[in-house]
Amino acid sequence: MTVGPLKVGIVYDAGSGDWDPKDVKAVLQNAKSVEKALRRGGHQTVLIPVRLADVQWLTKVQRCDAIFNLCEGVNGIARYEDYAVAALDLTRVPFTGCTSWTVTIAHRKHVANTLLTARGIPVPPFALMDRGTVPGHLKFPVIVKPSGEDASVGIDSGSVCTTKKALKERIAKVAGMWEDTLVQEYVPGREVNVGFVGSEMLPISEISFEKMPPGSWPIVTYAAKWDAGSPEDLGTVPMVPAPLSAELTRRVGLVARAAWRLIGQEKGYGRVDLRIAPDGQPYVLEVNPNPDISDDAGLSRMAAARGWDYPSLILRVLEEALERGARRREAEAQYLKLPV
């Protein structure tokens, strides 16, 4: 789909007064990188910060031809992303990334896992827990994480538990900080990520844990993602494309696509994280809508392996949103009698 110059609004979380300055800088840097890529593509841009209890940003949205949505929360609260995307849905302005349905479901990992399991897509056994309770049907080791967060929030070296005592303590800690707690059987094996833009699957990436500190569980913690230079960061090395056999690539691709089709609806962009068990069976850990799309993030590395440089990725994401918006307008005109 070829489009002329557009006015593209870049929506992002404005944060709050208690944000670390480096977090504010990272959000703005990402927005500026996207802005630069869009301008290289010939588009006009405007930055639109989103703040809690202030909906004036929606007026600015409606003055744009399209929106590049970088809002991963409001005031840093992940679940408020659901409301921001739902508001974008109502404006009828085409916007990048996943629909409000997908974002909302993905922020409730237990619901997403239930849907995946019902469809026959392999997911490690799991349970939604309350403070002080221990699941009896799960086998140790297990991993404990907030059900309503993303970006590895709440995951650290103590997230994997091997005893009931450790599990009780971890559940109490997580439940005391977040609303819902997910306990899931830990799957040993290789960890891979599969990126999607619309229905197009990008080359598979693998996370190598060979350089993790001795005694550490091979998992992607919050520090591994966001604390540059930390032992966890240095110990989680992405490899793109993943060094998988043709058969294993096929298996991972089938499972990842099925998960993306169900939860992501093949709309927007996203990433499916999986573990490959020793017997070769891929298991879906999470479906991540609108993952980090900065120029050094995992999705960008996968796009580069596909042959897209960063500006090409950003413009392709925008193009997918415009194509989806055109289909929506046609459907509304036909069934709801709204103007195209």
Image (cartoon, grey):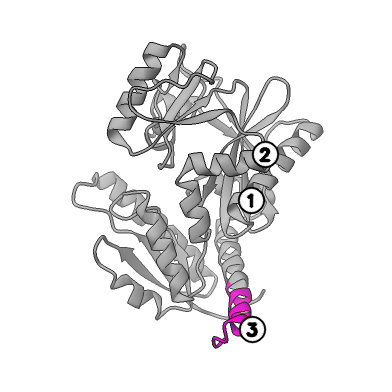
Q: Magenta residues: mostly which secondary structure?
A: helix
The answer to whether any part of residue 54 appears in the image is yes
- Mark drawn on residue 121: 2
Which residue is drawn at the image coordinates 45% and 62% (left, top)? Answer: 69
- Mark drawn on residue 262: 1
Instruction: Say what secondary structure mark 2 lies in.
Output: loop
Viewer-side residue, 279 vs 190:
279
Of pointers 2 and 1, the one earlier in the residue sequence:
2
Instruction: Say what secondary structure mark 3 lies in.
Output: helix
Label 2 neighbour load within 10 Å: few <14, some 14-19, many 20+: some
- Is label 1 in contact with label 3 (beta carbons under 8 Å)? no
Image location of residue 188, percent across then percent down? 60, 20
Q: Which amino acid, by three-letter code, is at mark 1?
A: Leu
Instruction: Say what secondary structure mark 1 lies in.
Output: helix
**Magenta stretch, residue numbers:** 325-340
- Is label 2 in contact with label 1 (beta carbons under 8 Å)? yes
Count how many numbered circles sit on residues in the image.
3
Mark 3 = which residue? 334
